[in-house]
Image (cartoon, rainbow, N blue to C red):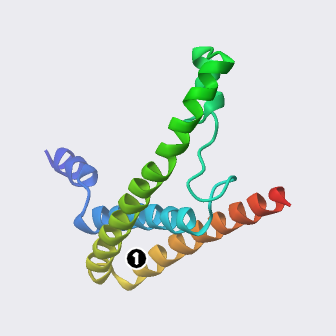
Amino acid sequence: MREERFAKKQMKPTMKTNLLALAAAGAIALGGFVVVQAQPGPGGAGHWHSHTFGLRGITDKLDLTAEQQTKVQPILDQAKPQIAAIHQEAMQKMHTVMNSTLSQIRPMLTTDQQKKLDAIEKAHQDMLNAKKQLHDAMQD
């Protein structure tokens, strides 16, 4: 009986553990948001890689003729800024929610947990900065 209670107690996550996990996930997501905002894609802001939405991806998958490609390209070009604006707005809203969430969670953490969260955020930011530097170096 005692072993059963001990096993249940070990499997039950604590509130602090849950909050720390949520804070860490939020920090990682927020860090990704900051870098996404700070660095435009290879073709500048709003650029889509050809394999996701560009003409080349559609051409490869649908085997468009040259005439069809000529007709499709202006439609894609017209849609790009609209979708980029929607994406930008969504990212701003997410950023607001993440900041609010982390500002509510941080006071609930112990000093050690806050230090861990800071370290997680810094490590994630360092990784994203390194990726950005690599990306920038490859563009030169």
Image coordinates of residue 120 in percent, x first then y, are 52, 70
Quadrant of the image for the C terminus?
Answer: bottom right
Image coordinates of residue 114 in percent, x first then y, are 41, 80
Q: Which one is in front, 70 or 136?
A: 70
Quadrant of the image for the N terminus?
Answer: top left
Extreme-right residue of the structure:
140
Q: Residue at x 27, y 53 (%)?
A: 10
Extreme-left residue of the structure:
1
Q: Residue at x 63, y 14 (%)?
A: 63
Q: Which one is in front, 50 or 20?
A: 50
Crowd band around label 1 with a 10 angstrom C-alpha radius: few (<14), some (14–19), many (20+): some
Q: Which one is in front, 30 or 108?
A: 30
Reply above or below: 121 against 28: below
Q: Residue at x 53, y 66 (%)?
A: 37
Is there any visible trace of residue 20 in the rendered image?
no
Q: Amino acid at mark 1?
A: Gln
Is there any visible trace of residue 135 in the rendered image?
yes
Residue holding disc 1: 113
Across the whole image, how many numbered discs are drawn on residues? 1
Query: Helix, strand, or loop for circle 1?
Result: helix
Q: Which one is in front, 123 or 43?
A: 43
Q: Is residue 46 left or right of residue 14?
A: right
Reply above or below: 71 against 2: above
Image coordinates of residue 46 in percent, x first then y, are 55, 54
Q: Is residue 11 left or right of residue 5?
A: right
Quadrant in the rendering for residue 52: top right
Q: Is residue 62 left or right of residue 28?
A: right
Quadrant in the rendering for residue 16: bottom left
Reply above or below: 95 against 3: below
Image coordinates of residue 135 in percent, x first then y, are 74, 58
